Image (tube, rainbow, N blue to C red):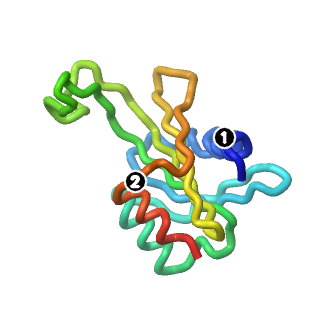
Amino acid sequence: MNEKEMTKALENVYSIVSKNANDGLAKAYGVDLTAFATAKEIGSGEDVYDVIQDINLDKKQSQYEFVAITTTGWAAPLNPNGEIDCPPSQHNDRRRVTLLSMVNIRQAEIASAIKFDDEEEMIFDFGGATGSLNLAMLSLAE
């Protein structure tokens, strides 16, 4: 998928799953983007890595083209040194944030969207993410 198509897919999936995203749980969805976007919950739990591992062990992703993961939490600005002064949940300027990551399990491509509760716009990433969540998501690819 090109970035324009993936942006639309992320926006559509977010509109489906966002109503269930603020209960503090990481959630996984099997996603179909054929005629219209559908997202069926296939896992949830307190730890996103446990959710991904459970899906992978049961191969729940195999019947879908994409798997989407949502996590929520607090974000806070970094200090001038690029570090955090305290946990984001305790920072005076904290903001609630939802992360939606989606992996194409046949092509091992990842895209994500970050949505701050106090902003309308989403921030998109198309394959530039790195780190442990990125690697865990790629483990779902076949």
Q: Residue at x 39, y 57 (%)?
A: 133
Q: Is residue 133 left or right of residue 70?
A: left
- Rounded to the nearest angstrom, the CA distance separating label 1 from label 2 is 19 Å
Q: Which residue is mark 1?
A: 7
Neighbor class of circle 2 (other Cα within 10 Å; few <14, some 14-19, many 20+) is few
Q: Is residue 79 left or right of residue 125?
A: left
Residue drawn at (71%, 53%), measured in percent from left and top?
1
Q: Up-down: is 22 above or below 118?
A: below
Q: Residues within 10 Å of mark 1 (few under 14, many from 20)?
A: many
- Rendered location of residue 42, percent (x, y): 56, 65
Front-most of residues 30 and 1: 1
Q: Which mark is residue 16?
A: none
Going by the numbered disc 1, the residue's amino acid type is Thr
Between marks 1 and 2 in the image, the one whose residue lies nearer the viewer: 2
Q: Which mark is residue 130?
A: 2
For the residue pair 20 and 64, the one nearer the viewer reads as 64
- Residue at image point 15% right, 32% down: 86
Name the foreground residue: 46 vs 56: 56
Quadrant of residue 22 in the image?
Answer: top left
The secondary structure type at the circle numbered 2 is loop
In x, y percent, where is residue 49?
37, 63
